[in-house]
Structures are given as structure tokens and as C-alpha cells.
């Protein structure tokens, strides 16, 4: 079960501290698994504090992704590429990707695995529990990134990612329902894609 | 590209004024009231969603609007887009009213889905989910036609149980177990009804349902799995896919019981097998059976839990068979790999619960390994296989040597640059560290290979290796590990060269004739004369020697890689690992090993790859651990006196590694004493004294001749104190040191010195000299003050001579004062 899905920036954003990352979209699928282990889901926090804590955790994840991705790109000797509009699929082919672990309590109680995909200056991130099937996670992340790139023109100058977030929700609802990674063969995937295309066309 | 427009939208959403916001709320309220689902409503709801989600502080939506959104969300007639927006907005906003939402009366599967999303996101307590899970289970129970069941019932349930498994009662669990068996094992084997209506004149055609195919296009030979392809799927085939997607989680949550129970289950199974001959309804007439169905055991009367285990096992078995087929689509090839990982992992879980499955699983797992081991493309599938061997090979008396040999010898060397494999590999090691350390000799021996993952992916893997490093250390490997850690940046550079060299097509020409001088590291890498060096750095296993002679030559050859980002990143992780190394080693190091380590510190402190800051950082680590090593084994000063004298008499060491040098001088003063080692002779003290005296003399001279001093004032005070300490232990030396100290005033007054050291520093030097002169006038007191007994080992007492000396002085002077005043009385 994926804990959450994030779309965020990987480049500098004015007004953010150095190394910060702006979260453009976030979807947390439910309470954290580790909380269940402790059986005390943040006992003394009111809903507002709980939300704040959750947001801070997500911000930490995206900062980490930005940093790890930056280091990986630097090590690979790949300079940041300028966006080429209309060539989303090529951008996706060239995307960097990686994975790292955040230990227990740092900040998620049970520890998590963070799977990321960096398409130019946009990061797509899945936060998973420690023993998720990463091969499946990667392909889900790629499909989601593809749908988002195609339908929100994320690499362009528009602001659809924040204004048309329902499209991302609709995609998640089909490809990653409630955070469940699905074993989709190409036909299952095509059928879901078709259904999604019908949604986008509206 | 991140547009400034987006940023300003987010800002606006965050900073919207209360008054404006209230107006906006009421406008939306009106729009949704009129059931107008046009563009304006959609647009407003999108903006509302942005406003509530853009800030980390929750926004409270007015209660009438909240109710309206909730009503829209729960009404099946609402268009999906509006439902999505309502669901998203309610999820992100306050107040949280999970209890107000209920899926009770909702039949529509899409609606249940979006309502559940809100409930799950806002649940703060397990009670919040009980109603939802009861509702879902009720829908499973009622014998509705399959299409009435929400497809998403399993993902929702999966989320619920990962938060609070106790939501489900034993009956519930049995119900789901039965359902899962049905979906997994008995989904239709025909394609779903095609949606296509016929031509204009013909009307809807009723076509004969076509059979499903395997991923390679052959007609499906057995029961339905996620690797079966059809034009469209029936509802139970969709459920099959969802069921397999969650089966691992389900088994891990509810299939746990003591092995005692597993024995009982085994007995039960044996009993049922005897009493029944055939019961499976999956045996479709005329279809070609695969091995799985042909060997399927009768299990209808097994209790639900055992039956699910049986069916899940068969499902996995079939997936493994199916993965042998050559997929027509690339996506399916990828899915096959993911399925293999899942199938092997699920089999592992089942075998852990009921060891009787081990004997059935092994032939299949073994065959799978045999099939995959030659192809590196399947490396990530080999990891769960290795896990299976690790867990069960003993039970089944199967030899696992070959699997681990491939794992540790081949993967790191050839696949170090695959970041996901590297991660999964280290996770595998972390998860099994105790077993690997004890039971798999190859693990520790392969540390040079394992370090390749780290050298290449250091930022992502440093925390993993921080956990693994202690498990790689033992008295036999410690020295070689230390050298390897120090050479880690060289390894990163060499791996880079290895990749680049391999990517160059056939060597342009043989490089035999170029002689030893090379212009680039890449060229050197391809030169036979450097081959041995690179082979050593890239060696797969430990044991070929702790290090090599010509390290400085290697550093020279690699000089053009010293600024490559990967090498630099790698170098930055080394100090952390060195700290960890020493902290671990001192737990088991004997005197011999400590002696060796100190010698390596001395040797390697200068013999490092020339990366910016690298030497300084490593020397800092060395300095702090030198103190620990000497404290553990003070005799090493006596035992290694030759080497220590060599090190300290070389004034060049002051300029290249001052920190380490100062620490070395300090430990000599601290531990060269009969009280620490009875073998310590007057001659030894004298020879150390004379060495340090000459050094102090030399640097004070050089300073006046040449330019400003290139060392810190601290070096002078530590040298003076150490000389005084040694003199106090061999009192013939006292006049010499006193004479020397008395010259400090003229030294401090000289122009060059005054221009470089600050006033306070000079003051400090003079005070120290003065104190020491006075102290040495009373040799017996000096001996006490300058050599605290080993028992006075309290942390603050003599950790640092700078701190302990004034303290001791104060103690002594207060004693003297008391004595004096007593006399006056």
C-alpha cells in the first residue's frame, strides 16, 4: 500500500529556502501504517495539528528527493535540461529515478521507502511502506507521471497542475486506488487508460 | 519548468482575505445549490480545492457549504468530476466529520469509492473505520451479482487493515478468505463481453465469448491470473487482479499463527486429501491443463485460512510458470518480473506459516532460479529467491551456495550502477544481517564488492551502509576494510572508468607502446602496466592483501577524477563510515590489532586521494580515534616507539597534518610513563624528549627566518607541556626544559610572531611557559600534576591537558595557601 503520492518542484523557487521544494500536488491515502503499530495515532493532536504534522512530513520527503536527485544528476554529469514543450514522452524516457529509505521515526513511525522520478524540474514521488514491491511501484509511478504530463502540460508554463488537480485524482483513483499498487497487464492498463481518457475529455 | 504563474496562484490561495473567502464560499454554495454542474461550478470548485489544499494549516469550511459538498459527494447522480472535487476538498479541509459520512445507503460503486477516500484520509482513530469496513464486508456477504460489488472494495479494505487490523472479526476474516479464494482461483476463463455494438444495420451482436490468451498469444492453458490477456475482462477477472494485488498484505496481516497450528493444518490437509478425490470446479472441460491445475490438491473442505493459503500458492505457482512465456508487449515483460517478485515473496510467506509447503515450493523456485540466473536483467527477481533460500533451504536440505555466490560475486560487480537494484540489495542485506553474518561466509568476504554499491550511489546508500558496516567487520577483515574505506573515492573513480572504458567500442589501438606516462586516467585504466592496480581496487573479494604498495601512483593517475562530482560525493561519506568503523572495531580489537591500526593511521594520514577537504576530514577522524586507541592500549607508545618517533621528528607532518600531529604529541606526553607500561625506560623517555625538543626548536627557528608560522599556537603549548611532562618523569631533563621554556619570552616578542599570533594566543603561550617553569621547580608536585594517575580517569580530569592543567594547578595552589595560612596562625 502506497502511503502517498506527490508532485513537486526540483528547481529553485523564489520565496522558498534553498533546497526547498514546492509541493504542487499531494495525496495521502490514509492513516500511516506505523501508527497502527503504535496503536496511538498521534494521541494528543487535534485534527488541525495532525494535518500540519502530515504536511511537514511531506515537505521533508520532497526536500530529500530534491537533494538526492540533485546529487544523482550531478554525479551522472547531467546538467538540468530546459523544458521542451510537447515532448513529454521523450522527457519521461530521459527521466532520472531513484529510491531511498527514511528510517523509523524519521519522520514516519514505521519507516518508509521513497520512490522518485524526476522529469526535468518536476518530481513525482511515491512514499511506500518498507517492503513494497518496487518493480511494481516504479511502473505505477511511471504511468502516473505519463498521465500527468500528458494531461496537465506539466513541463509548460501553465498552472493546470494546481487548477486541474481533479485530473490527477481521477488518475490515482484508477491506477492507484487508495494507494493499492495493481498488477496491470497491458490490457488492464489500456482499459483503464481509455476510461481515464473519457474523464479527461469531459 | 515551474511557472511563476503557478507560484503566484499558490500564494494567492494562501493569502486570500477572510472577507473575500467568505464571499467565495457563499458563491459556491449558491452554485451547487442550483445543481448547476457547468464550467463555472467546476472552475469554482477547483479553486476551492486549491485554497484548502495550498496551505499546511487547515481551513474550516462553513457548515452549510460543508453539508452541500457532502451531499454532492454522496449522490450517485453527481458527475464524477464534481465528486472528485468534493472528495478532494472535504479531505483537505476542516472540520473533520468522519462520523457524518456513511456509505450505508450508497449502492453506487464509484460513489462509495470517493466517500471512502474522505473517510480514510480523515480517520484519526480505528473506530472511525469500523463502520466503513463493516459496510464493505456486508456488501461482500450479500449474494449480490458481482457487478454490484465495488471494484475498489479490496483496496479500501487493504488500507483499513493496514491501519487497524482489529477492525475485522474472525467471521469477517473467514468471509474475505473465502472470497479471495473464489476470485483468485475461479475467475472466468472466457473474455468479458465485448462492448462493441455491431454495424449500423446489424444491431448489437451477441458474440461467442473468446478464450483468454497468455502474454505470448497462446490460448490460456489454465485458470485466470493477472498474466492473462483478453480484449475485455469480466467483473470477477477484475476482482482477480485486485485480489492478487492485495494478497501479500492480507496474508501478512491475517495468516499469522504459530507453527504448532501449521502442523495441525497439515494434518487436516492430509485428512481431506484422503477423503476427497476431486473437487475443484476450475477444471474446465477441454482446456489444456497446466502443471498447476494438474497437481492441484483437493482443498474444498479445508478451513478458509488454509484453503486460501493453498489457492494463493497455486496462483503463485502458475504465475511463475506463466513468466516463462515471451511476452508480446514490453509492459507485460515488466509485469512478469513484478509478478515473479510477488509470487516468490508470497510463497515465502506461505512457507513460513506452513513449512509443509516448502517441499512443494522448492522444485518450482529452484527451476525458476535455474531459468533466471544467466540473465542479469532478472537480477531483481533473484533477491526474493535468495530470501527464499535463506529462509527455507535448511528445511528442505537444499544447497544455497550457488545462489549466494551469484548474489555477492556477480551482482555488485556488474550492476553497481543500477540504483534500484543497489537499494534492494542493501535492503536484503539489512533484513538478513544476522543470518548472513553467521551463516554465509561469502557475505563478509565480499565486502570489497558490496562497497561498490556505496561508492557509486553514496548519497542514497550511506545510511544503509552505516547499518551494514559493523556486520562486515571482524578481526580478520578490519584492516582491509579500513584501507578500503580510505580508498572508497578511488573505487568510485575506478568504477566510473570501468563503465566509460566498456562503453568505448573496441580499443582504438593497443596502448602497449605508450610507456608509463599517461595523459588521462581513462588511458591509464586501459594500460596493461596499471592493470594490477585497478584490478586490486576493483577486486570482488577480500583476502588478496590489505592494500597495495603503489597507492600514491594510483592517486596520481586518478588525479583528473579528483573533482568529479561522484568521487567528491563519495569522499564526503567516508568520515562518517570511519567513525563507525573505529567505534565498532574497538569493541573487539586486541592489542595487536590496535597497534596495527595506529600504524595505519600514521601511514595513511598522508596517503590519501587528493580531493578537496578529504585529507583534513580524514585526519580529524584519525585524531579523535587515536586518543581512544591509546587510552585502550597505552602500551602502544612503548611498543611502537620507533614509528612514533619517526612520525613526530618529521616536521613536514606539522604542516600537512597538524591536527593529528598535535594529538600524537599529546598522547606521547600522556601515556609514555612507567605507570602505563613497566617496560618504559629512561632512555625511551629521553629519546622522545630529545625528538620533541628538536622539533620545537626547529619550528621556532624556522619561523624567525622564513615567513609567518604555518602552525597554530596550540601546537607550541602542547609541545611545551609534553616536554614538561616527560621531564617530570625523568628529572635529569628538568633543567633542559626549564631553560628552553625561559626562552619563550624572547620568541613571543619577535616581530614575525607578534604579527601572526593574536595577543591572547601569545599571552597563553607565555602563561603556559611560566606555569610550567614554576611547576618544574617542585619536581615531586610536577610529577603529580603532569601525570594524573590512571585512576583519576573521570571524564573532565585529564581528557585535555589544556583543561586539566589549570585545574590541577588550582588544587595545588589552594592546598599550598591553606598550608601557608596555617603557618601564619
Image (cartoon, coloured by chain):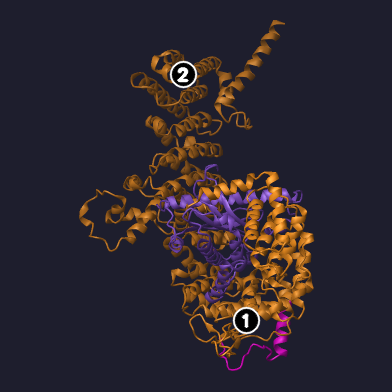
Q: Secondary structure at mark 1?
A: loop
Residue B184 position (above or below residue A20): below
x and y, in percent, of residue B657 in the image: 42, 34
Q: Secondary structure at mark 2?
A: helix
Q: Is residue A123 magenta?
A: no
The quadrant holding residue B500 is bottom left
x and y, in percent, of residue B195 in the image: 58, 82
| Residue that appears at 65% across and 80% down | B236
Q: Which chain is purple?
A: A
Q: Colour of chain B?
A: orange
* Region rendered in magenta: B264-290
Pair 1/2: label in front? 1
Residue, disc 1:
B234
* Contact flag, marks 1 and 2 (Cβ < 8 Å): no
| Residue that appears at 70% across and 49% down | B23
**The C terminus of chain B lies in quadrant:** top right
Residue, disc 2:
B737
Residue B9 position (above or below residue B498): above
Which of B96/B548 is in front? B96
Residue B403 position (above or below residue B265): above
Q: Is residue B283 magenta?
A: yes
x and y, in percent, of residue A135 in the image: 53, 66
| Residue that appears at 61% across and 46% down | B12
Identify the residue at the far bottom of this view. Answer: B286
x and y, in percent, of residue A16 in the image: 55, 43
Letter of the chain that mark 1 sits on in the rendering: B
Amino acid at each position: 500500500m502506497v502511503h502517498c503520492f506527490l508532485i513537486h518542484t526540483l528547481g529553485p523557487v523564489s520565496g522558498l529556502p534553498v533546497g526547498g521544494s514546492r509541493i504542487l500536488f499531494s495525496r495521502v491515502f490514509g492513516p500511516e501504517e506505523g501508527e497502527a503499530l503504535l496503536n496511538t495515532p498521534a494521541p494528543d493532536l487535534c485534527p488541525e495539528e495532525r494535518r500540519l504534522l502530515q504536511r511537514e512530513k511531506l515537505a521533508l520527503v520532497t526536500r530529500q528527493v530534491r537533494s538526492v536527485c540533485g546529487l544523482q544528476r550531478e554525479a551522472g554529469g547531467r546538467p538540468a535540461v530546459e523544458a521542451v514543450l510537447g515532448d513529454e514522452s521523450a522527457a519521461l524516457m530521459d527521466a532520472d529515478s531513484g529510491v531511498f529509505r527514511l528510517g523509523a521515526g524519521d519522520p514516519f513511525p514505521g519507516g518508509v521507502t521513497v520512490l522518485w522520478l524526476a522529469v526535468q524540474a518536476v518530481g513525482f514521488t511515491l512514499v511506500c511502506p518498507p517492503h513494497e514491491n518496487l518493480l511494481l511501484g516504479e511502473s505505477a509511478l511511471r504511468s502516473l507521471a505519463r498521465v500527468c504530463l500528458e494531461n496537465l502540460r506539466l513541463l509548460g508554463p501553465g498552472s493546470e497542475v494546481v487548477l486541474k488537480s481533479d485530473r490527477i485524482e481521477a488518475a490515482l483513483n484508477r491506477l492507484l486506488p487508495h494507494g493499492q499498487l495493481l498488477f496491470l497487464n497491458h490490457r488492464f492498463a489500456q482499459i483503464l487508460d481509455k476510461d481515464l481518457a473519457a474523464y479527461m475529455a469531459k | 519548468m515551474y511557472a511563476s504563474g503557478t507560484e503566484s496562484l499558490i500564494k494567492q490561495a494562501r493569502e486570500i482575505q477572510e472577507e473575500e473567502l467568505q464571499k467565495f464560499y457563499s458563491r459556491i454554495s449558491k452554485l451547487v445549490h442550483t445543481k448547476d454542474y457547468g464550467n463555472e461550478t467546476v472552475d469554482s470548485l477547483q479553486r476551492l480545492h486549491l485554497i484548502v489544499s495550498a496551505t499546511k494549516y487547515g481551513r474550516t469550511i462553513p457548515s452549510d457549504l460543508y453539508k452541500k459538498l457532502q451531499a454532492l459527494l454522496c449522490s450517485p447522480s453527481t458527475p464524477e468530476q464534481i465528486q472528485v472535487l468534493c472528495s478532494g476538498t472535504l479531505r483537505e479541509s476542516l472540520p473533520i466529520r468522519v462520523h457524518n459520512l456513511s456509505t450505508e445507503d450508497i449502492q453506487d460503486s464509484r460513489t462509495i469509492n470517493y466517500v471512502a477516500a474522505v473517510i480514510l484520509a480523515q480517520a484519526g482513530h480505528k473506530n472511525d473505520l469500523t463502520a466503513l469496513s463493516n459496510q464493505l464486508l456486508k456488501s461482500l456477504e450479500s449474494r449480490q451479482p458481482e457487478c454490484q460489488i465495488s471494484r475498489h472494495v479490496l483496496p479500501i479494505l487493504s488500507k483499513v487493515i493496514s491501519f487497524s487490523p482489529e477492525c475485522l472479526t474472525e467471521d469477517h476474516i473467514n468471509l474475505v478468505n473465502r472470497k479471495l479464494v473464489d476470485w483468485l482461483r475461479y475467475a472466468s476463463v472466457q473474455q468479458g463481453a465485448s462492448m462493441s455494438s455491431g454495424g449500423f444495420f446489424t444491431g448489437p451482436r451477441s458474440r461467442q465469448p473468446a478464450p483468454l490468451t497468455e502474454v505470448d498469444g497462446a490460448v490460456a492453458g489454465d485458470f485466470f491470473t493477472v498474466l492473462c490477456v483478453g480484449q475485455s475482462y469480466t467483473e470477477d477477472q477484475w476482482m482477480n487482479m485486485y485480489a492478487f494485488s492485495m494478497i501479500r498484505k492480507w496474508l501478512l496481516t491475517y495468516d499469522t499463527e504459530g507453527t504448532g497450528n501449521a502442523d495441525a493444518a497439515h494434518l487436516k490437509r492430509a485428512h481431506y486429501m484422503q477423503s476427497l478425490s476431486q473437487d475443484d470446479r476450475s477444471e474446465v472441460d477441454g482446456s489444456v491443463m497446466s502443471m498447476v491445475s494438474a497437481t492441484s490438491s483437493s482443498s474444498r473442505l479445508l478451513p478458509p485460512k488454509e484453503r486460501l493459503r493453498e489457492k494463493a500458492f497455486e496462483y503463485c505457482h502458475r504465475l511463475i510458470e506463466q513468466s516463462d512465456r515471451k511476452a508480446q508487449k514490453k509492459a507485460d515483460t515488466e509485469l512478469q518480473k513484478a509478478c515473479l517478485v510477488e509470487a516468490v515473496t508470497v510463497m515465502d510467506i506461505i512457507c513460513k506459516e506452513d513449512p509443509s509447503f516448502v517441499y512443494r515450493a522448492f522444485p518450482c523456485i529452484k527451476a525458476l532460479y535455474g531459468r533466471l540466473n544467466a540473465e542479469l536483467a532478472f537480477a531483481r527477481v533473484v533477491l526474493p529467491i535468495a530470501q527464499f533460500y535463506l529462509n527455507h533451504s535448511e528445511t528442505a536440505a537444499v544447497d544455497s551456495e550457488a545462489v549466494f555466490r551469484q548474489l555477492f560475486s556477480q551482482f555488485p560487480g556488474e550492476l553497481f550502477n543500477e540504483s534500484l537494484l543497489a537499494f534492494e540489495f542493501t535492503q536484503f542485506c539489512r533484513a538478513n544481517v544476522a543470518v548472513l553474518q553467521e551463516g554465509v561466509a561469502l557475505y563478509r568476504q565480499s565486502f570489497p564488492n558490496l562497497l561498490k554499491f556505496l561508492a557509486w550511489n553514496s548519497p542514497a546508500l550511506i545510511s544503509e551502509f552505516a547499518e551494514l558496516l559493523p556486520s562486515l567487520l571482524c578481526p580478520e577483515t578490519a584492516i582491509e576494510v579500513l584501507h578500503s574505506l580510505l580508498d572508497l573515492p578511488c573505487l568510485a573513480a575506478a568504477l566510473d572508468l570501468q563503465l566509460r572504458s566498456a562503453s568505448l567500442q573496441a580499443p582504438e589501438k593497443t596502448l602497449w607502446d605508450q610507456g608509463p606516462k599517461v595523459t588521462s586516467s581513462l588511458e591509464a585504466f586501459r594500460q596493461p602496466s596499471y592493470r594490477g592496480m585497478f584490478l586490486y581496487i576493483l577486486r570482488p573479494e577480500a583476502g588478496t592483501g590489505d592494500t597495495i604498495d603503489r597507492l600514491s601512483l594510483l592517486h596520481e593517475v586518478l588525479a583528473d577524477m579528483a573533482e568529479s562530482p561522484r568521487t567528491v560525493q563519495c569522499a564526503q561519506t567516508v568520515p562518517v563510515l570511519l567513525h563507525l568503523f573505529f567505534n565498532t572495531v574497538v569493541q573487539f580489537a586486541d592489542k595487536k590489532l590496535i597497534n596495527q591500526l595506529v600504524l595505519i593511521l600514521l601511514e595513511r594520514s598522508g596517503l590519501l586521494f587528493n580531493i578537496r577537504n578529504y585529507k583534513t576530514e580524514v585526519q580529524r577522524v584519525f585524531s579523535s580515534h587515536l586518543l581512544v586507541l591509546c587510552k585502550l592500549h597505552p602500551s602502544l607508545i612503548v611498543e611502537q616507539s620507533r614509528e612514533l618517533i619517526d612520525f613526530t621528528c618529521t616536521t613536514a607532518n606539522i604542516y600537512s597534518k597538524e591536527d593529528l600531529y598535535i594529538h600524537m604529541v599529546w598522547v606521547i606526553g600522556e601515556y609514555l610513563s612507567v605507570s602505563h607500561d613497566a617496560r618504559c625506560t629512561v632512555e625511551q623517555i629521553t629519546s622522545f624528549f630529545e625528538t620533541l625538543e628538536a622539533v620545537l626548536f626547529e619550528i621556532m627557528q624556522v619561523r624567525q627566518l622564513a615567513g609567518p608560522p604555518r602552525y597554530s599556537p596550540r601546537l607550541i603549548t602542547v609541545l611545551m607541556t609534553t616536554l614538561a611532562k616527560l621531564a617530570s618523569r625523568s628529572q635529569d631533563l628538568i633543567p633542559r626544559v626549564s631553560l628552553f621554556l625561559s626562552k619563550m619570552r624572547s620568541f613571543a616578542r619577535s616581530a614575525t610572531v607578534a604579527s601572526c599570533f593574536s595577543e591572547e594566543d601569545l599571552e597563553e603561550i607565555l602563561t603556559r611557559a611560566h606555569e610550567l617553569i614554576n611547576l618544574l621547580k617542585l619536581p615531586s608536585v610536577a610529577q603529580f600534576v603532569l601525570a594524573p594517575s590512571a585512576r583519576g580517569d573521570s571524564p573532565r580530569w585529564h581528557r585535555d591537558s589544556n583543561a586539566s592543567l589549570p585545574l590541577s594547578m588550582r588544587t595545588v595552589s589552594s592546598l599550598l595557601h591553606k598550608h601557608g595560612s596555617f603557618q601564619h596562625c
